[in-house]
Image: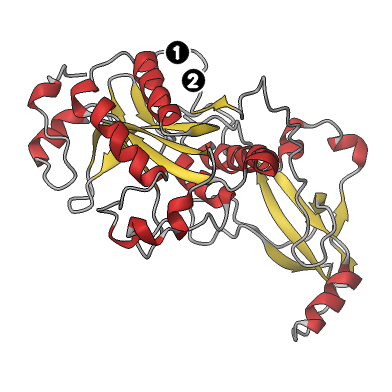
Amino acid sequence: MTDLSLENVDFSDEEFDDDRYEEFLNERFGVFGFNMLVGHGEAKPNCGRYEGDVGCLNVDGHRFALQLAGVGVEEEVYRRPVFHNCHRPACPKCYRGWMVLEGKRIAARLAEGSKRWGLVEHLSANVPPERYGMDFKAMRAFVLRALVRRGVVGGCLIYHAFRENKYTRHWFFAPHWHCLGFIRGGYTCRSCAKCAYASRSVCAGCHGFEAHTRECFNVDGVIAKVAVDDKGEAGKRRSVFQTAKYQLSHASIRTDCVRPQVVTWFGVCSYRKLKVVFVPEKPVCPICGNQLRPVVYSGSKHFCVDRDSADFKSDSRERLVEDGCVVWEYKPESDFRGSGSYARYG
């Protein structure tokens, strides 16, 4: 990787030189130094391999539910293909599965913390450009101190090494962190008329987060702010899971350690202070709500299992009987009990 001087690079969102962009990521897209976008690593041989189907054979329940919805059906089963998933953030084939599972873990942990600390807020903390050359651990500690100084009592940090230029759609190096967590006393500026929050430019001198973060900016130079919604206002999180999943979708991984942690916890949400047992939800049939189980098909129909093909279907409703024969049945439990692939359900 070409050694670039940070002093000669323009890190602004508004202006970015295409030639410099090519020099940034000239070896492999999504990689700069020890920083890599999720999904840009190497896949293992089994990643993405088709391993069978799971489904639901509750045809009576399906008929009743679909008839209530105004859909006339025969005896139909629900089918979903299963693919091997290593759940590694670096894997280009499996990182989406990791993203969903990690998002659910974040949502579950913050839901427990919100019982005491109130509403979950989404914040971003931008490192000053003059500190881009800091050691990663020192940079994270610097950002963490900046958040604590602003009254953030705990939450999770998601590392982003890159930003996307909204005009050229190019990615460039600009390390920052996203935080899903809790502010001491809550984000009172959302309902404060004095803050003139709609403009995000002035604060009338009250003692809420907006006033405090402006005071702290003069000390550490960190731009820490509550994320805005589509209307440009600091809206409440409609879904913590969806917010977390989106931030994980373009998070960054450190390639200079054996087990890189994309998500880290601090403060009142740290593993030492908040004990949460996360139990992944088992997949259920979207028609009747029964738990999906491995199934076997013995008919003559061909199913496309290439996820890159235009003919691929992530799920489908299929007929239980073909040419007078039952072609779907549950796989014997002894064949899949304890199986790692079926336990993850792709």
223 or 336, which lies in front? Answer: 223
Q: How is the image coloured?
A: secondary structure
Question: Disc 2 marks which amino acid?
Answer: Pro
Name the side, left or right, on which 136 lies relative to 11: right
Q: Residue at x 48, y 51 (%)?
A: 188
Q: Is residue 184 visible?
A: yes
Which residue carries the number 1 mark? 257
82 or 194, which lies in front? Answer: 194
Q: Residues within 10 Å of mark 2 (few under 14, many from 20)?
A: few
Height in image: 323 above or below 122? below
Q: Residues within 10 Å of mark 1 (few under 14, many from 20)?
A: few
Height in image: 84 above or below 76? above
Q: Is residue 30 visible?
A: no
> Split into 4 quadrants, where in the image is the N terminus?
top left
Height in image: 297 above or below 96? below
Give coordinates of residue 337: x percent, y percent: 87, 34
Q: Residue at x 85, y 58 (%)?
A: 290
Question: Disc 1 marks which amino acid?
Answer: Cys
Name the side, left or right, on which 66 lies relative to 205: right
Check disc 2 and report its element: helix, strand or loop.
loop
> Split into 4 quadrants, where in the image is the C terminus?
top right
Which residue carries the number 2 mark? 260
Q: How much space separates mark 2 and mark 1, taking CA atoms? A: 6 Å
Give coordinates of residue 258: x percent, y percent: 49, 13
Give coordinates of residue 257: x percent, y percent: 45, 13
Check disc 1 and report its element: helix, strand or loop.
loop
Give coordinates of residue 242: x percent, y percent: 54, 51
User: Disc 2, disc 1: CB below 8 Å?
Assistant: yes
Height in image: 64 above or below 215? below
Q: In terms of image quadrants, where is residue 288? A: bottom right
Q: Residue at x 70, y 40 (%)?
A: 112
Which numbered circle lies on residue 31? none
